[in-house]
Image (cartoon, helix red, strand yellow):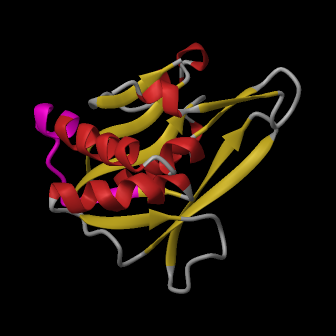
Amino acid sequence: MDLKSLIRDIPDFPKPGIVFRDITTLLRDSEGLRYTIDFFTEKCLDLGLTADYVVGMESRGFIFGSPLAYKLGAGFIPVRKPGKLPGAVHSIEYELEYGTDCLEMHQDALHPNSRVLIVDDLIATGGTASATAKLVQKIGCELVGFGFIIELQDLQGRKYLPDVPIISLIEY
């Protein structure tokens, strides 16, 4: 299946010169969504990426991470923006192009030595994925890999990630 054909390009969003890769058109296509999750699962299994937990970043990482965790027989852990989780949290602040941001995870979500696969819809500059990896590793977990639906290769985000397998289903 040609997954790229299910991604809508929106020029000049969120600002002029940017082409936004919109996954909502993929999500509405039942066959495309099923194929994406099945293909993602197959790629993980082909690479031997077994995990105790799939960690997905807010919010589109939840969409793909939950069914992938189900297919892999793993638990799912959400990583959220500050103030969204009700319990005690681990947090990590990270640099953006202009400023900083923060991610949080419940303190009781992961246990040291757990095997973790990090999933999101897209990797651009790698900042959010890298911060999530640091958060997972700070807890003492083993990072087994990353999975993305889309990779924007020109932004070279992959070079900022730890040296583990990286799956991207669609490359621009």
Which residue of the protein is positioned furthest toward the top in this rendering?
Answer: 154
Total label count?
A: 0
- Indicate the quadrant where residue 78 lies: bottom left
Q: Specify whether residue 118 is in view.
A: yes
Q: Nearer the viewer, residue 91 or 74?
A: 74
> Where's the N terminus, which quadrant?
top left
Q: Residue at x 31, y 59 (%)?
A: 67
- Indicate the quadrant where residue 72 lies: bottom left
Q: Is residue 103 left or right of residue 48?
A: right
Which segment is the magenta one?
43-55
Q: Specify whether residue 158 is in view.
A: no
Return the x and y of residue 68 as percentages of the image width and height.
28, 54
Q: Tell me: residue 161, above or below residue 130.
A: above
Q: Residue at x 66, y 76 (%)?
A: 83
Return the x and y of residue 170 as percentages of the image width and height.
43, 25
Return the x and y of residue 137 as percentages of the image width and height.
35, 51
Q: Residue at x 35, y 78 (%)?
A: 108
Q: Nearer the viewer, residue 76 or 22?
A: 22
Q: Is residue 129 left or right of residue 69?
A: right
Return the x and y of residue 113 as percentages of the image width and height.
19, 59
Q: Is residue 84 left or right of residue 36?
A: right
Magenta highlight on residue 44:
yes
Q: Tell me: residue 5, above or below residue 74.
A: above
Q: Nearer the viewer, residue 71 or 141?
A: 71
